[in-house]
Image (spheres, rainbow, N blue to C red):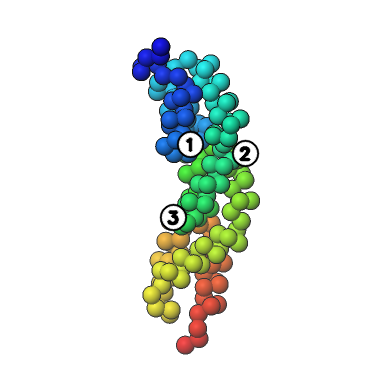
Amino acid sequence: MKSKKNPDPLKKSLMLLSRKMLTEKQLRDKLQKENLDWQKVEEAIEKLKVWGYLDDRKYLEEYLRSKRSATSWGYWKIREKLKEKGLPEELIELLRELYPLEDEIQDAKRLLENWVTTPRGADQARLLRKLAAKGFSHEAIQEAWRRYQEDLPLP
């Protein structure tokens, strides 16, 4: 019989993954805090990958989707956070493919439209700093501002 102090790595992993999606590194870090047999941990991780419960690419895609809609983060902020979560660099390199510059520009322009209360009363420097703080790329910020200005009605 397993003691509570030394749980089965597979059961512990499934319990952790049932709460929220984790990267492979995040799961390893959590399991490292337990007194577990590391060979069994590696076997559990491999099973979870085969079963589709642990998939860093799916994590990347879901994280991107949620951060674009819930926090309105730009490319660089999302990239930084994915690194912190321990995703491998080769997956992080897919981010621009999954979040093309055109989509980032549209997200930035949408934020500009939401932030500005009077069409001609926009403080450009303040708005561009806000976009930069949300991690939008320089290219996206500049193009979003250009498109925003183009769409304003003439006085």
Task: Report the residue marked by disc 1.
Answer: 22
Q: Amino acid at mark 3?
A: Ala
SS assignment at label 1: loop
Residue reaching furthest to the front? 1
Expressed as whole percent of the image width and height from the top left, the position of residue 81 reads 47, 44
Expressed as whole percent of the image width and height from the top left, the position of residue 118 reads 39, 78
Q: Is there any visible trace of residue 123 in the rendered image? A: yes
Mark 2 → mark 1, Cα distance in angstroms = 18 Å
SS assignment at label 2: helix
Among the two numbered marks 2 and 3 on one chain, the one whose residue lies closer to the N terminus: 3
Q: Amino acid at mark 1?
A: Leu
Task: Report the residue marked by disc 2.
Answer: 90
User: Residue visible at 52% across and 49% down?
Assistant: 64
User: Residue visible at 46% across and 34% down?
Assistant: 17
> What label does residue 70 carry, if any?
3
Among the two numbered marks 2 and 1 on one chain, the one whose residue lies closer to the N terminus: 1
Q: Nearer the viewer, mark 2 or mark 1?
A: 1
Q: Quadrant of the N terminus?
A: top left
SS assignment at label 3: helix
Mark 2 → mark 3, Cα distance in angstroms = 25 Å
How busy is the neighbourhood of tag 2: few (under 14 within 10 Å), some, or many (20 plus)? few
User: Residue visible at 58% across and 35% down?
Assistant: 52
